[in-house]
Image (cartoon, rainbow, N blue to C red):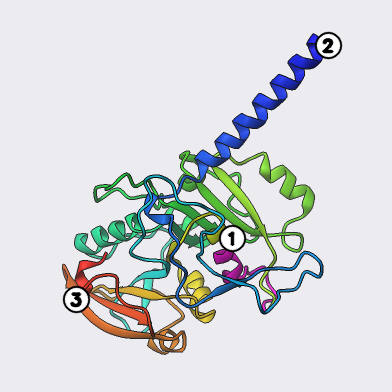
């Protein structure tokens, strides 16, 4: 009887420790807890009986009804999706030189702005190719953290789990990272089980159905945003690369965009694959520009979305 009680106590302790670790892995920036909905999108609640979404029941995409605010909660200034991209000044909108290694090409002032935007975000989202090319940390480093803020959660779209088992910073530095991948069709179950043993406690693998309109292993950006919202992450910064930017633009899920145009031209540029027409088709309108160092910065918003500050250059 004593042995049985000891076993039960030990098991309960392990469960509690596991639950606590899971909570610690996703403690969002205090400013990310809010009851402010996403301005354009809603989640249709799925009926458990038929699996369909009833028309009469819907919840704002970034609602936090299931995530009550903490004692230090303050409403965020921003919700939704902010796209940030940097280009050269060529007509192809080059995002990098066609070389094995990439180098920064924007001004220090623009780089500071990027870190301020990360600080204002609940999560920073990139695609697999960006991690492979830059081995980026996606953390706030060049500006001070304020008001009890914590580092944003890193989000990586890796449909086929090609990054797992490799030594990239976002997978090994101990800070929270969500890795979204396609379930079943793109990753064999046995391979997926083996993969889970290769990730650290700070990395969470999230299975998603592949995009219904795509024959390849692309993920649905809307479903990703819904999942992030369910985790209490309400302002998502999409930082790259161009394929990931196109994914969210084509789905018309970008609420605002900050585009940095550096005064250089790559000799052999990697084209962004989108331009002003793409942004306009995504429902965005350029509302102004500013200069940061030698870079020209363009500010775009969706109709009905106000800029978070009275002057464009004041946010982020």
> What is the number of the mark on residue 1?
2
Q: Is residue 53 left or right of residue 112?
A: right
Examine the rendered structure and indicate whether residue 136 appears above or below residue 310. Answer: above
Give the mark nearer the N terminus: 1 vs 2: 2
Examine the rendered structure and indicate whether residue 93 appears above or below residue 202. Answer: below
Give the mark nearer the N terminus: 3 vs 1: 1
Examine the rendered structure and indicate whether residue 149 appears above or below residue 299. Answer: above
Q: Residue at x 75, y 73 (%)?
A: 52
What is the spatial separation of the Cα atoms under label 2 and label 3, in whole angstroms? 73 Å
Q: Position of residue 216 (x, y in %)?
A: 68, 72
Identify residue for label 3: 290
Q: Position of residue 95 (x, y in %)?
A: 38, 71
Secondary structure under badge 3? strand
> What is the number of the mark on residue 265?
none
Q: Is residue 3 left or right of residue 301?
A: right
**In the rendered image, which quarter is residue 218 located in?**
bottom right
**Residue 266 seen in the current view:** no
> What is the number of the mark on residue 227?
1
């Amino acid at each position: 009887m004593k042995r049985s009680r000891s076993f039960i106590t030990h098991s309960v302790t392990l469960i509690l420790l596991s639950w606590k670790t899971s909570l610690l892995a996703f403690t969002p920036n205090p400013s990310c807890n809010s009851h402010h909905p996403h301005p354009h999108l809603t989640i249709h609640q799925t009926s458990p009986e038929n699996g369909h979404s009833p028309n009469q029941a819907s919840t704002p995409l970034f609602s936090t009804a299931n995530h009550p605010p903490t004692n230090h909660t303050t409403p965020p200034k921003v919700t939704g999706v902010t796209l940030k991209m940097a280009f050269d000044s060529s007509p192809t909108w080059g995002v990098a030189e066609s070389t094995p290694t990439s180098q920064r090409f924007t001004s220090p002032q623009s780089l500071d702005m990027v870190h301020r935007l990360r600080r204002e975000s609940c999560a920073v989202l990139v695609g697999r190719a960006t991690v492979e090319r830059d081995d980026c940390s996606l953390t706030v480093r060049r500006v001070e953290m304020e008001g009890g803020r914590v580092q944003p959660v890193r989000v990586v779209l890796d449909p086929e789990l090609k990054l797992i088992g490799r030594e990239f910073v976002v997978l090994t530095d101990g800070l929270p990272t969500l890795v979204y991948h396609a379930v079943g069709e793109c990753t064999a179950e046995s391979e997926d089980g083996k993969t889970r043993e290769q990730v650290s406690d700070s990395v969470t693998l999230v299975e998603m159905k592949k995009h219904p309109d795509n024959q390849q292993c692309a993920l649905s950006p809307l479903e990703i945003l819904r999942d992030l919202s369910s985790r209490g992450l309400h302002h998502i910064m999409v930082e790259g690369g161009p394929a990931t930017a196109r994914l969210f633009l084509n789905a018309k899920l970008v609420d605002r965009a900050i585009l940095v145009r550096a005064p250089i031209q790559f000799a052999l540029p990697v084209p962004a694959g989108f331009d002003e027409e793409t942004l306009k088709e995504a429902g965005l309108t350029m509302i102004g520009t500013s200069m940061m160092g030698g870079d020209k910065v363009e500010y775009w918003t969706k109709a009905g979305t106000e800029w978070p500050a009275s002057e464009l250059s004041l946010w982020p």
